[in-house]
Image (spheres, rainbow, N blue to C red):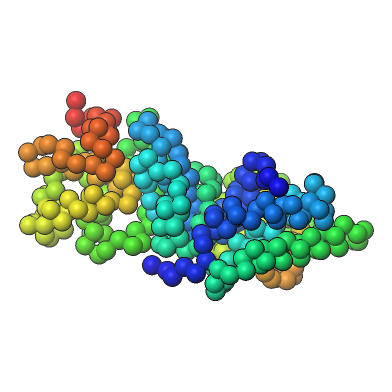
């Protein structure tokens, strides 16, 4: 028996509306390609480039947040709205709560500092390391950026090498460049 | 990290939804089966974290569906009409806004308010979805609404 897409959609809506999900996810379209977005009752848990909601993604969410993981556009609608505004250039700061479950304490401190780097500006791995009181940990900061669970919203694209080179980005260097250009940080 | 004994709900739902809908259609007909389908999986979702292992999931969800079908049959018999006990002063809120509106309510109250006023489910169905009694569901919805009123008058 095939469940119609309308019936399916209504169930997913109801499940999210009733607050019964440990994590709701969806794949949202963006100018830099599809983004896998997952939200829990505590906040935004994941953004992944090119994510397609594969079984692996879903399993990871279940391990982090609990088994009640469901594709539910409604659960990510606020995140999607703010991302759309960001890409349209009308939003310079996100008002989203983040859920940093599964992130180690050092990384959490680095990400908290990263969140303070303003729109349209860049910083370096070394400067960020110094801010968290570990001036020689630029490399470790690089690793944290590389594993950032919530790119774009936690703006690791604003972190560049000390010589100004873009160095690396999980979504690809062209994406990093595009985000910085959108923000007017590079021309 | 939590230890997960059951598959993510997404996989469970994808695997069993077709069979559940088939069972409900045979018992209730196409129209009533749709409501019952939603109720079955909401009930399953509510109980899901309490499952201790992933065996017999198919039997488990088909049992829930059967109970939902039996309840639907009972309701279909003529009985006293249900009178809503809570008047919402400014009309019934659009269900799409309810999720946001009820954000921050205790989970049971939130679910009861959304299912009652957003999805128009009667209290016995809400009770079924929440695994409680109709009276408890009514009280949860009622105290949720009181809490929201208190909040909006601040």
Residue A30, compared with residue A70, is above or below; it is above
- Residue B54 locus on image (x, y percent): 55, 68
Q: Quadrant of the C terminus of chain A?
A: top left
Outermost residue on the right side: it is B78
Q: Position of residue B142 (x, y in %)?
A: 68, 63
* Residue A14 position in % (x across, y down): 62, 51
- Kindly tell me whether residue A97 is visible in this rendering: no
User: Splitting the image into 4 quarters, where does residue B15 fall?
Assistant: bottom right
> Seen from this angle, which residue lies furthest bottom?
B52
Residue B28, above or below A153: below
| Residue shown at the point (39%, 54%) measured from the top left | A45
What's the residue at 51%, 56% (across, down)? Answer: A69
Report whether B139 appears left or right of B69: left
x and y, in percent, of residue B66 in the image: 76, 63
Q: Quadrant of residue A89?
A: top left
Residue B125 falls left or right of residue A121: right
Above or below residue B49? Residue A78 is: above
Q: Decide if residue B73 is on the left or right side of residue A72.
A: right
> Between A148 and B133, which is closer to the camera in this rendering?
A148
Determine the residue positioned at 26% across, 37% down: A172
Q: Look at the image and tell me whether residue A3 can be seen.
A: yes
Q: Residue at x 35, y 33 (%)?
A: A32
């Amino acid at each position: 028996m095939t469940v119609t897409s309308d019936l399916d959609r209504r169930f997913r809506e109801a499940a999210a509306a009733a607050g019964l999900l440990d994590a709701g996810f969806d794949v949202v379209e963006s100018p830099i390609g599809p983004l896998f977005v997952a939200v829990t009752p505590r906040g935004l848990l994941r953004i992944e480039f090119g994510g397609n909601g594969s079984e692996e993604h879903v399993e990871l969410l279940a391990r982090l947040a609990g088994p009640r993981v469901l594709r539910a556009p409604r659960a990510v609608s606020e995140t999607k709205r703010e991302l759309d505004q960001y890409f349209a250039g009308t939003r310079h700061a996100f008002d989203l709560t983040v859920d940093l479950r599964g992130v180690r304490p050092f990384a959490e401190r680095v990400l908290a500092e990263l969140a303070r780097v303003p729109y349209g500006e860049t910083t370096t791995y070394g400067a960020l390391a110094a801010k968290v009181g570990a001036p020689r940990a630029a490399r470790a900061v690089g690793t944290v950026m590389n594993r950032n669970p919530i790119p774009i919203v936690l703006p690791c694209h604003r972190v560049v090498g000390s010589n100004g080179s873009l160095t690396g980005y999980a979504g690809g260097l062209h994406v990093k460049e595009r985000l910085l250009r959108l923000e007017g940080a590079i021309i | 990290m939590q230890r997960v004994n059951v598959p993510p709900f997404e996989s469970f739902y994808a695997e069993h939804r077709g069979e559940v809908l088939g069972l409900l259609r045979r018992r209730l007909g196409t129209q009533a089966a749709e409501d019952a389908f939603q109720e079955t999986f909401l009930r399953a979702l509510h109980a899901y974290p309490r499952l201790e292992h992933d065996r017999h999931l198919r039997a488990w969800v088909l049992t829930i569906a059967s109970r939902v079908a039996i309840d639907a049959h009972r309701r279909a018999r003529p009985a006293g009409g249900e009178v809503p006990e809570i008047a919402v002063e400014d009309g019934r809120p659009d269900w799409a806004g309810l999720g946001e509106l009820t954000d921050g309510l205790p989970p049971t109250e939130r679910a009861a308010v959304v299912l009652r006023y957003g999805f128009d489910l009667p209290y016995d169905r809400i009770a079924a979805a929440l695994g409680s009694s109709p009276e408890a569901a009514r009280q949860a919805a009622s105290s949720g609404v009181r809490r929201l009123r208190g909040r909006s008058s601040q």
